[in-house]
Amino acid sequence: MDQGIAALLGASIGVAGTVLASVITGWSTRQQVRAQARAEHAHWRRQVRRDAYSAFLAPANESQNALKMAGRAFVGERDTEEIDRRLQQADDQLALARAAWANLAVEGPETVEQAARSVYTTLRSMQTTLLALRDSPVNTPDGNARFLERHAVEVGRLSERLSEFAVAARAALDDAEGLDVLPVGRRR
């Protein structure tokens, strides 16, 4: 083989190798950038969800405490002023929980939103029971036992619902798969 052709062939192979290496490096860099963007997005999304879950859970817990305290104010001598104060506190916190619940519908996932709905519904049921108890005559033959029993059941149910919410929220935050959003047009 002539030295000129060998040099030309060698140079061509070198150029092709350089171009191929450049293409591979560019592709690899794009893949790394996409992976980094997905990881950052997942981290951001997890933080947004955690904030949304906390924004619901805090007023739900405050409402629970206020409703428990209102229920205790019925025991013995009925303290109407304390009952009304606690029911108002609960109502204020329920308004905050409802607003946060709307945000959960957007942030998801559906399991967390459903668990939040169960918590909110149980809180409202507790509030309704205590309002009915407050408005009932004080000296009924059964001592308003049905309302007190119902309230006791709702207190237990609410604890279960709050636990279910916490479990669903933790599962959603730990689910990296559910947080990894692919660019539009790309599907797994």
Image (cartoon, rainbow, N blue to C red):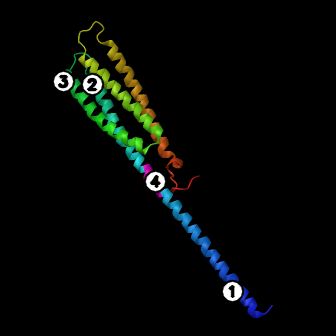
From the image, state whether disc 1 or disc 2 is nearer to you.
1
| Crowd around label 2: few <14 · some 14–19 · many ≥20 (10 Å) | many
Say which amino acid is labelled 4: His
Q: Which residue, given by chain and number where applicable, does mark 3 sit on? A: 81
Q: Which numbered disc, 2 or 3, marks the residue that appears first in the sequence?
A: 2
Q: Which residue, given by chain and number where applicable, does mark 2 sit on? A: 70
- At x 53%, y 60%, the residue is 35
Say which amino acid is labelled 2: Ala
Estimate the spatial distance between the alpha carbons at disc 4 and disc 1, rounded to whole Å: 47 Å
Mark 4 and mark 2 in contact? Answer it, CB < 8 Å.
Answer: no
Estimate the spatial distance between the alpha carbons at disc 1 and disc 3, rounded to whole Å: 94 Å
In magenta segment, residue 64: no
Does residue 165 show up?
no
| SS for dot 2 | helix
**Image quarter hosting the N terminus:** bottom right
- At x 42%, y 46%, the residue is 49
| Crowd around label 3: few <14 · some 14–19 · many ≥20 (10 Å) | few
Say which amino acid is labelled 3: Glu
Q: Which numbered disc, 4 or 2, marks the residue that appears first in the sequence?
A: 4
- At x 57%, y 53%, the residue is 187
Where residue 15 sits: x, y (%)?
A: 65, 82
Q: Nearer the viewer, residue 138 or 106?
A: 106
Mark 4 and mark 1 in contact? Answer it, CB < 8 Å.
Answer: no
How many numbered marks are there?
4
Q: Which residue, given by chain and number where applicable, does mark 1 sit on? A: 11
Disc number placed over residue 43 in the picture, else none: 4
State the residue lying farthest toward the top: 141
Does residue 41 show up?
yes
From the image, state whether disc 4 or disc 1 is nearer to you.
1
Mark 1 and mark 2 in contact? Answer it, CB < 8 Å.
Answer: no
Mark 4 and mark 3 in contact? Answer it, CB < 8 Å.
Answer: no
Q: Nearer the viewer, residue 136 or 186?
A: 186
